Image (cartoon, rainbow, N blue to C red):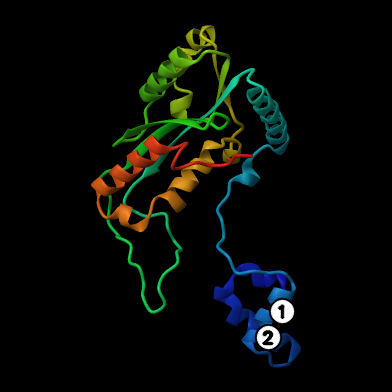
Amino acid sequence: MIQKACLGIQRIKVFLQEVITSTGKSCHIQTLKGIFKRHRLVWKRYRKSLKPERDEVLFEFFKSELSYLEQQAKQGIIDLIFMDESGFNLNPNVPYGWQPIGQQILLPAKRSSTNWTVLGTLNIHSQSFYGYMMPEACTAKTVVEVLSNLSERINKKTIVILDNAPVHKAKIVKEKLVEWRKKGLYLQFIPAYSPELNKIEILWRQMKYYWLEPNDYQSQNTLYQKIIEILQNYGSKYSISFS
């Protein structure tokens, strides 16, 4: 019965009435909350996930392969790059924050006419990040340009980890694979529904939930300027420990 309460606090009064009806005994809502706590139940946000959709065997196999690649990168044998794109607009990703008692910080609620997209390549061992910002959705042409530029900068075998987005597997991308391999650049796609295997996702979350502040969402210009500032200062002012 306790597990049934995990449907959420919105239903706690309904659940309380069911307890009273089934037991014939009265119960205060605070007593019920105390019972939840004793059973190690906490009130927190539900998260949407595609985890049930993925192939767990394939996920675990790639996870071990990725661990091996990371060891090679630490030893300097290869360079390991995580690549992905993320969108930013004037709808803040800041649901919670410390606020003065009796006051409430109001975030702008605007429809964004421009959705900035950042296509990034991240080397977690050298803490180097290259971000390409555009006022539109990422295209396969942009992916080709970024990977081609990367292939000209590498000095050792380089493996790029990325997901299965259509722009990553477009025809014009596949047509460049042989050319890139000759230069030492290889693409490795993670299994479907496994975003946590692409560590650049950690950087996107850090940007959206911590580095971007409420005032940065005042206008398209303020948002643009802050994103540029983060991209230019990653590895110094802004950094993440992936260990």
Q: Is residue 131 visible?
A: yes
**Amino acid type of the residue tagged 1 in the rendering:** Ile
Q: Is residue 60 left or right of residue 14?
A: right
Q: Quadrant of the C terminus?
A: top right
Q: Residue 236 placed where, x, y %?
A: 45, 38
Tag 2 residue: 31
Quadrant of image for the N terminus: bottom right
The answer to whether 122 is drawn above or below residue 224 in the figure is: above
- Read off the residue under disc 1: 35
SS label for mark 1: helix
Q: How far apart are the alpha carbons under marks 2 and 1? A: 6 Å
Q: Residues within 10 Å of mark 1 (few under 14, many from 20)?
A: few
Disc 2 is placed on an element classified as: helix
Image x and y of residue 129, in percent: 46, 31
Residue 182 lies, with reference to residue 82, above or below; the image says: above
Does residue 100 appear left or right of residue 126 in this picture?
A: left
Residue at 45% x, 64% y is 97
Q: Position of residue 122 (x, y in %)?
A: 50, 31
Label for residue 66? none
Left or right: 151 with respect to 26?
A: left
Quadrant of the rendered image containing residue 170: top left
Is residue 172 something that shows in the picture?
no
